[in-house]
C-alpha cells in the first residue's frame, strides 16, 4: 500500500540536505541576533530569504555557501520537491522581516518571541529534517483540495 501526498509540485527538485545546512546557518545567525540584536543580521536574513523564496535562490549567500559544501561532497544528496521548501522560505522571509522591524524599533519582547520561534523552526529543520513550513504547505494544500471537492 502506497501513501500519496496530494500537493502541487513545480517539477523542480532540491537537495534536502543542502536545505538543512542552510537551516543550520539560519539557526546560527538568529541565535547571534537574539543574543545581540543587530539590524544588519536581520536585514541580511530578509534579503537571503527573499532570494530563496522569490528568485530561485540564485542570489542567496546562504545557498551559495551550502553549495560549496555540496560541491565538495561534504553533504549527501536527497532530492525533494522544491514547492514546499519555497513556501517555507516565504514564511522565513516574513519572519525575518518582522524580526528586522522589531530590532529596528527595539521591541525586545517581540524580538525574543520571533527569534525563539525562528530558532525552533530552524533547529527542527537542520537537526531532524522536520520542515514546519512544509508541514503548513501540505496542510493548506489538503484544505484547498477538500474545499475544491465541495
Image (cartoon, rainbow, N blue to C red):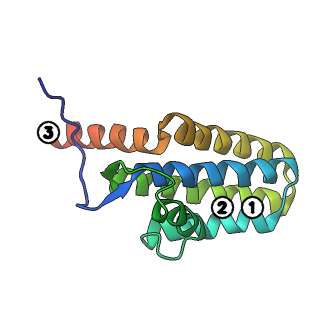
State the image coordinates of residue 80 (x, y, percent, origin top left): 32, 49
- Residues at marks 2 and 3, CA–CA distance in whole angstroms: 36 Å
Q: What is the C-alpha distance between the residues marked 1 and 2?
A: 6 Å
Kind of element beneath mark 2: helix
Instruction: Rate crowding at label 3 as few (under 14), some (14 to 19) or many (20 or more) other CA atoms within 10 Å.
Output: few
Nearer to us in this view, 114 or 125: 125
| Sooner in the amino-acid sequence: mark 2 or mark 3 | 2
| Rendering coords of residue 112 (x, y %) | 79, 43
- Quadrant, the C terminus: top left
Find disc 2 in the rendering and name its residue: 97
75 vs 105: above or below: above
Distance between the alpha carbons at the discs numbered 1 and 3: 40 Å
Q: Residue at x 18, y 35 (%)?
A: 4
Q: 57 left or right of 100?
A: left
Q: Eyeballing the image, is 30 above or below 135?
A: below
Labels 1, 3: front one: 1
Q: Residue at x 64, y 37 (%)?
A: 120
Residue at 72%, 46% (x, y): give it.
115
Mark with earlier residue (1, 3): 1
Instruction: Point out residue 119 in the picture as x, y percentages from the top left corner.
Output: 67, 42
Name the side, left or right, on which 25 lies relative to 136.
Answer: right
Residue in the foreground of this view, choosing between 142 and 72? 72
Residue under label 3, please give it. Answer: 149
Number of callouts: 3
Amino acid at each position: 500500500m502506497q501513501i500519496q501526498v496530494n500537493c502541487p509540485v513545480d517539477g523542480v527538485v532540491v537537495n534536502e540536505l543542502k536545505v538543512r545546512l542552510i537551516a543550520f546557518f539560519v539557526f546560527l545567525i538568529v541565535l547571534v541576533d537574539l543574543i545581540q540584536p543587530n539590524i544588519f543580521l536581520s536585514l541580511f536574513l530578509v534579503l537571503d530569504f527573499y532570494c530563496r523564496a522569490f528568485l530561485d535562490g540564485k542570489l542567496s549567500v546562504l545557498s551559495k555557501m551550502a553549495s560549496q559544501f555540496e560541491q565538495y561532497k561534504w553533504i549527501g544528496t536527497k532530492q525533494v520537491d522544491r514547492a514546499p521548501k519555497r513556501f517555507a522560505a516565504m514564511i522565513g522571509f516574513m519572519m525575518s522581516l518582522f524580526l528586522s522591524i522589531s530590532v529596528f524599533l527595539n521591541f525586545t519582547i517581540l524580538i525574543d518571541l520571533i527569534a525563539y520561534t525562528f530558532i525552533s523552526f530552524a533547529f527542527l529543520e537542520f537537526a531532524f529534517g522536520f520542515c514546519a513550513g512544509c508541514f503548513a504547505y501540505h496542510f493548506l494544500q489538503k484544505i484547498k483540495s477538500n474545499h475544491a471537492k465541495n
